[in-house]
Each structure stands twice: as C-alpha cells, then as structure tokens.
Image: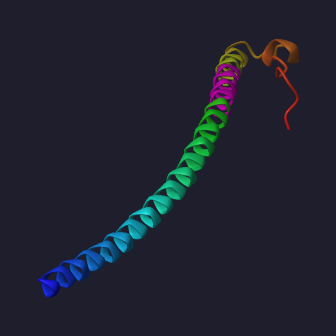
Amino acid sequence: MLRFFLGCLLVGLIAIVIGWRWYGQELAIRETQARQITGLSAQVAKLTSDNARLNAQLTQVQNEEARLAHDNDALRETIQETKLTGKVPPKEEIIAPPPYPPK
C-alpha cells in the first residue's frame, strides 16, 4: 500500500513539474505574440499615415498634371492660330501664371 501511495505521489509530482514547464512555455509564447502584435500595430499605423500622406501628394500631382495639360492645349491652339494667321498673341493670353511658385 505504501508503494502504491509513493508511486501515485511520484506520478503526481512529475505531472506538476511537466505542467509547470508547459505553463511557462505557453506564457513565453503569449508574451512573444503580444510583442509581435504591438510591433505590427505600430507598422500598420505608420503605413496608414504614409498612405494618407502619399494620397494627398498624388492628388496634388494629379491637379498639377491637369493644369499642365490645360496649358498644353492652350499652347497648341495658339500655335495653330499663329500658323493660320501669322500673328502671335500677347504672352498673357497664351499661358496663365502658375497658381503657386514651383519648388
């Protein structure tokens, strides 16, 4: 009977040690995953702000491209008119000044 009791006690202690090590490993894995989640969240926030900034810059570039296309069309019309009539219109009529100084 004493052997049975000591055997059960030994099996119980081994189970506790194995359970404690397993719990420690799970805790370490969760801490690692929490750090990874925090790092990835920071990356997502940075990429979101970069995306907003780049979208604003893209809009500015598209507006500038549209303005330049309009100026190009005006120049083409002026060139066609000059070829037909032989007169060059004043500079103010050809190209409107840019809305802001170029950088």
In the drawing, does residue 55 fall left or right of residue 34?
A: right
Q: Is residue 47 magenta?
A: no
Q: Is residue 95 visible?
A: yes
Q: Position of residue 25 (x, y in %)?
A: 40, 70
> Which quadrant of the rendered structure holds the C terminus?
top right
Between residue 14 and residue 97, name the one nearer to us: 14
Q: Residue furthest front?
A: 1
Please name the residue shown 50% across and 60% down the image.
31
Between residue 83 and residue 17, name the one nearer to us: 17
In the drawing, does residue 87 fall left or right of residue 56?
A: right
> Which quadrant of the rendered structure holds the N terminus?
bottom left
Principal secondary structure, stretch drawn in magenta? helix
Height in image: 93 above or below 61?
Answer: above
Q: Total of numbered circles in the picture? A: 0
Height in image: 83 above or below 35?
Answer: above
Q: Position of residue 41 (x, y in %)?
A: 55, 46
Q: How is the image coloured?
A: rainbow
Q: Is residue 65 magenta?
A: yes
In the drawing, does residue 51 fall left or right of residue 78?
A: left
Please name the residue shown 71% across and 21% down the image.
71
Q: Position of residue 11 (x, y in %)?
A: 21, 79
Stretch of the chain drawn in magenta: 57-71
Q: Is residue 90 visible?
A: no
Residue 47: quarter of image: top right
Q: Position of residue 43 (x, y in %)?
A: 58, 49
Please name the residue shown 82% across and 20% down the image.
99
Height in image: 86 above or below 4?
Answer: above
Between residue 56 and residue 72, name the one nearer to us: 56
Q: Residue furthest bottom?
A: 3
In the drawing, does residue 25 fall left or right of residue 44?
A: left
Height in image: 8 above or below 75?
Answer: below
Please name the residue shown 85% across and 34% down the image.
102
